[in-house]
Image (cartoon, rainbow, N blue to C red):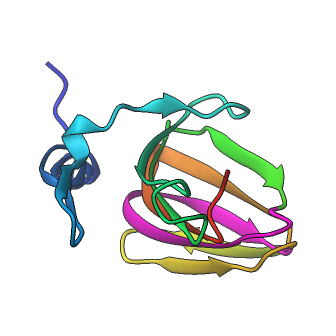
């Protein structure tokens, strides 16, 4: 059996024990299914809070990018996006600037600015928030 990395263990804590608390209820992350990204291979999402739940104000997603995979260059014309790196490592190119992604990094990606994210050899695990919500 392959030994899990410190990064994988940290992410599993969010994936298996994480919870969303709202005034209405509590939602366990473990109860939310993973969805394959519709465009980028090796990228999966857990939709923690959807635009439907917030009347389009924001959405919140747990993101898992497989080792050496990428969310390719793209633009969100209407949404400001933030990334909070939980575990793993990688690089974000934000408007041509390279940002080192490692646990504890937070990046703000303004609307209508090209960006991409590439995971390192251990994969990359992050929270992504969109304001207004990503449809």
Q: In the image, which residues are magenta?
A: 76-96
Number of numbered discs on residues:
0
Q: Judge from the rendering whether residue 35 lies leftward or rightward of residue 39; answer left or right.
A: left
In percent of width and height, residue 10 lies at 21, 55
Q: Is residue 60 magenta?
A: no
Q: Is residue 90 magenta?
A: yes
In percent of width and height, residue 55 lies at 56, 65
Give the residue at x 35% y 31%.
33
In the picture, the quarter occupied by the N terminus is top left
* Magenta part, dominant SS: strand
* Front one among 86 and 54: 54
In the rendered image of this protein, does residue 17 appear above or below residue 77?
above
In percent of width and height, residue 82 lies at 57, 74
Q: Judge from the rendering whether residue 38 lies leftward or rightward of residue 121; answer left or right.
A: right
Give the residue at x 24% y 69%.
22
* Front one among 119 and 113: 113
* Front one among 119 and 23: 23
Give the residue at x 22% y 54%.
14
Give the residue at x 56% y 58%.
51
* Front one among 58 and 121: 58
In the rendered image of this protein, does residue 54 appear above or below residue 28?
below
Q: Quadrant of residue 91?
A: bottom right
In percent of width and height, residue 12 lies at 20, 45
Q: Judge from the rendering whether residue 1 lies leftward or rightward of residue 100; answer left or right.
A: left
């Amino acid at each position: 059996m392959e030994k899990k990395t410190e990064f994988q263990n940290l992410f599993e804590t969010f994936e298996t024990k994480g919870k969303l608390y709202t005034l209405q209820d509590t939602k366990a992350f473990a109860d939310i299914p993973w969805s394959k990204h519709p465009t980028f291979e090796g990228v999966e999402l857990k939709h923690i809070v959807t635009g439907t739940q917030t009347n389009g104000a924001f959405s919140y997603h747990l993101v898992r990018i497989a080792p050496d995979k990428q969310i390719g260059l793209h633009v969100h014309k209407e949404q400001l996006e933030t990334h909070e790196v939980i575990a793993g490592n990688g690089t974000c190119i934000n408007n041509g600037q390279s940002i080192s992604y490692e646990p504890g990094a937070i990046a703000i990606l303004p609307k209508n600015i090209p960006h991409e994210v590439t995971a390192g050899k251990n994969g990359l695990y992050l929270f992504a928030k969109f304001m207004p919500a990503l449809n």
